[in-house]
Amino acid sequence: MIWKLFLPFCLCVVPLHAADWPNWRGPGFNGISEETDWDPDRIENILWKMEVGTGFAGVAVAGGRVYTLGHDGRKSGGEETVYCLDVKSGKTIWSDSYPARLLPNLHEGGPAATPTVHGQSVYTFGKDGKLNCYVAASGKKIWGRDVLADSAMNKPAEWGFAGSPLISGDALIIEAAHTIAYHRQSGEILWKSERFKPAYATPVIFTHKGRKLLVTLKTEGLVVLEVASGKTIAIQEWKTRFSTNATTPIVIGDKIFISTGYGRGCGLFEFNGESFKEIYINKAISNHMANCVLIDGHLYGISGNTHGIGKKHLVCMKFDTGEVKWKQQGFGCGTVSAAGKRLMVLTERGELVISKASSAGFDALARAQVNSGRCWTVPVLANGAIYTRNAKGRLVALGVGGKEGK
């Protein structure tokens, strides 16, 4: 098999630092950094700035390097670029550019998927379906696929491809009209799920009674697949206006939480291995694109849409009952991540707010204007630095303590 040619790459794995952020939603796939040595009062300490092109792709941070994607902004004949930057200086270590569509639709366009670092490889997924695997240190391209063609789609979905690459064993899993598993070393297709309407969410791997499964939020609703084969196990209908589900499910034991925009709201379901049982559905949290984080049994997330449908709030809600504990305005359609029991909220206009994660009420510890323009990309804290990005591609690294931030 082709993948045997790449065994040397797998025998020498680059170790990750304890507080790296190697993929979408971080090392625990929960939006929570493992960083402990950082100071909220230092969020105005700018380490460096870098222009990485139009887009909303998040950053992956691993092995002293930062990875992201951007587009040159041309509506015709444009290019997408993968960047590998030095964490200390922001200088480009390597980059790779290739033709790609901008796909601006009610926003600036450009790539939206976060790179995934695994071992010595980094995987990137572009706006119109270019899936690439590189040697993480050098940028040497190992393989590439056109997911648009692999999924037999005539054109990308309305807002392009947005789900980030997900690793499970030897499989690299990608969301399109099909969920597709590629061999992560060779790029060959291992399986395709049945066909659904194109989706924008990133899947989640979980285990139920010893069975390894995958859950993803398709346009039709919540779908559970068998990881080994892509076989459909269960479907829970969950539809929205404009056929847009774009958030990653949160799985805790046999409970699965989802939240989507356009006033659809949120729901918690119990999965029994074959079907779903509704625990609650309400409109308390309506995540448009930005996910919630779960801390001490409470969800914290931005509720409200990017285009003015309803008021926008930061909401604290009890996970198991759906009871709202508090709401706080002033963030626009921002994004939320966390470290320990502190929230990092990046407002839609680039103000970073650090607050306690407390069900008793909103309690800001620090705030600073760290970026500008439209900011829909989640802030990332890794190895003493917080990274924020705006739609035009201004990537700002803030030194907040720890090894890289002092």
Image: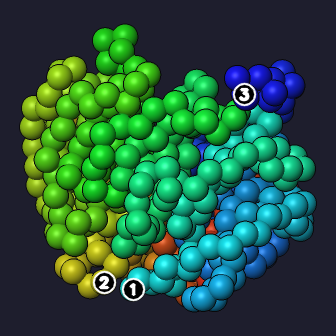
Mark 1 sits on what residue? 106
Circle 2: residue type:
His
Mark 2 sits on what residue? 307
Q: Position of residue 96 (x, y in %)?
A: 80, 64
Q: Is residue 366 left or right of residue 209?
A: right
**Could you say which disc has been placed on residue 3 in the image?**
3
**Could you say which disc has been placed on residue 333 in the image?**
none
Is residue 359 shown above or below 121? Answer: below
Q: Which quarter of the image is occupied by the N terminus?
A: top right
Circle 3: residue type:
Trp
Q: Quadrant of residue 211?
A: top left
Q: 10 Å neighbourhood of mark 1: few (<14), some, or many (≥20)?
A: few
Q: Earlier in the sequence, mark 2 or mark 3?
A: 3
**75, 22: nearer the viewer:** 75
Circle 1: residue type:
Leu
Residue at 78% x, 44% y is 142
Q: Quadrant of residue 269?
A: top left
Disc 2 to disc 1: CB gap under 8 Å? yes
Q: CA distance from mark 3 to mark 1?
A: 41 Å
**63, 8: nearer the viewer:** 8
Q: 10 Å neighbourhood of mark 2: few (<14), some, or many (≥20)?
A: few
Q: Quadrant of residue 13?
A: top right
Residue at 73% x, 74% y is 52
